[in-house]
Amino acid sequence: MSSATTILSLPNELLIAVVAAAQLDCGIDEPINSRPEWILSHLCRHFRRVIIAAPALWTNISISLKHVEQRERLEEIFKLFLRRSVPLNVAVSLRILSPAADATNVLADYLSQVVPEFTRMQSLSVALESNRNDLAVEFVPLCHLAAPNLLHLDIANISPLSTRRCPVELFSIGAPKLSSVRMRGFFPFPVPSWISSTIRLELDNVGQLLNGDDTLYLSVIMQPLALVYLRLDLSEVHSAVDQIRIPSLECLSVTVDDGEDGPYVVNLFDCPALTEFTFVGTHGDQILWLLDMPYLRSSYPVLHTLSFINTEQRCHCETSGIVVPTRTHFPEIPLFPALSSLVLINQCFTRNVLKEIFGTRAMPWPCLKTLALSLEHDRLDVRGTLRDTVRHSSQTIPKLRLCRTLFSLEEWEEGGVDVEVFDPEETTKHFRVVDD
């Protein structure tokens, strides 16, 4: 029996399973006409009949438009996928990466095709690369629409030249199941009703709000929320607001500016269930200001992980004449009484921070079990400070998780300290604004 005969005699169920397994290896930029369901449906009439009759093979619809001349062909394929996936729910990914002027309204055209099928939409991901300021018009087809089955929404302008957040109106009739929302360069406004039931919200925005109006931005996070995970860019938000209370919140990540008041956003939130708090964009002197706070207006009784991350490989604070604050307040109780994990990545003044945390005058950290430390500059100086801290601190030294370069500079185990290699990439990759 020939191999061709063997392949053609596969049971229909097994053929469908083979195609479904091949789909798992398809990346987000995989051309839609190179996907296994498309290729194998053109192999022979038998394969075509079986594959087209299996809606589950057509539910992941990914379009990546990089050249305007692809537009007409890809739109036809897009329509075919929508038809063949009926009646199942679909996940749609649209990447419009052609900045040419004649690519205007391409996204709106695709979204118009989706509107009649939107009750089947389960996931929608949109990535644009545009420097325009009027991108809201691209989303007009989704303004006055219901999304009864939508679970995930991801909208991004990935242009490195874009510096504005664009307000967009989406699903004004409702999206009752929408649990995960991520927006980069966009902002949901007017405040949608579905924001109050969202479990995960990420607003990774860069630059100032349209017209510099912070109230638009803050109006979202001042709603009654049921969030468990929240990520916000507060680097350009300067409004004075009351505390933001989110009793359900467990994980919070905020991007701050390089001013002294950056870490003081700990008092902006009232989240008694918070277990993980991450600051992105901080510098070492800001951490020192935080450690010197006389009191916390907020309470974080169960916070176990506190991270300070600078995504820049090197800053010039230590050579620019910045005055490093010294502690003047000594609270009777720890700032974060349940803290068990502290992470410092690419922080200037790391030596000063280590002294304030573990020095002879430092406050106790009764539950601290691990310290993760990574930096690309002044490694020898930090190594010396850390070594002296390990030898002379009156406190119990937690397990050290060090980047590979720090780990290799010292025989740490000889001092009786538990040490392991720490890969900062696993942490910092979650805080990149622009897609790779």
Image (spheres, rainbow, N blue to C red):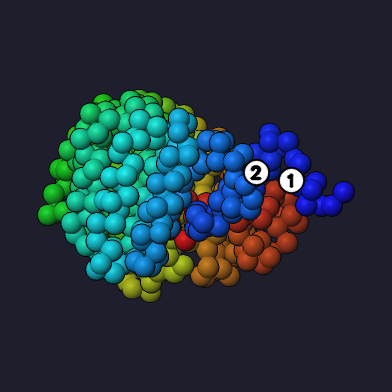
Q: Is any part of residue 195 visible from this angle?
A: yes
Return the residue at label 1.
Answer: 8
Return the residue at label 2.
Answer: 46
Quadrant hosting residue 181 = top left
Q: Residue at x 36, y 59 (%)?
A: 72
Q: Residue at x 76, y 47 (%)?
A: 7
Q: Residue 234 vs residue 83: left or right?
A: left
Work out which residue is located at the far front of the displayed protein and give it: 45
Using the image as rendered, state which of residue 244 and residue 48 is in the foreground. Answer: 48
Q: Residue 354 vs residue 16: left or right?
A: left
Using the image as rendered, state which of residue 62 and residue 368 is in the foreground. Answer: 62
Number of marks: 2
In this view, 155 is above or below 157: above
Q: Is any part of residue 251 visible from this angle?
A: no
Q: Residue at x 40, y 32 (%)?
A: 120
Disc 2 from disc 1: Cα separation: 8 Å
In this view, 97 is above or below 363: below
Secondary structure of the residue carrying tag 1 is helix
Three-letter code for the amino acid on which mark 2 is drawn: His
Quadrant hosting residue 27 = bottom right
Residue 49: x %, y % from top left: 59, 41
Three-letter code for the amino acid on which mark 1 is drawn: Leu
Q: Residue at x 56, y 36 (%)?
A: 53
Circle 2 residues within 10 Å: few <14, some 14–19, many ≥20: some
Circle 1 residues within 10 Å: few <14, some 14–19, many ≥20: few
Q: Residue 206 vs residue 359: left or right?
A: left
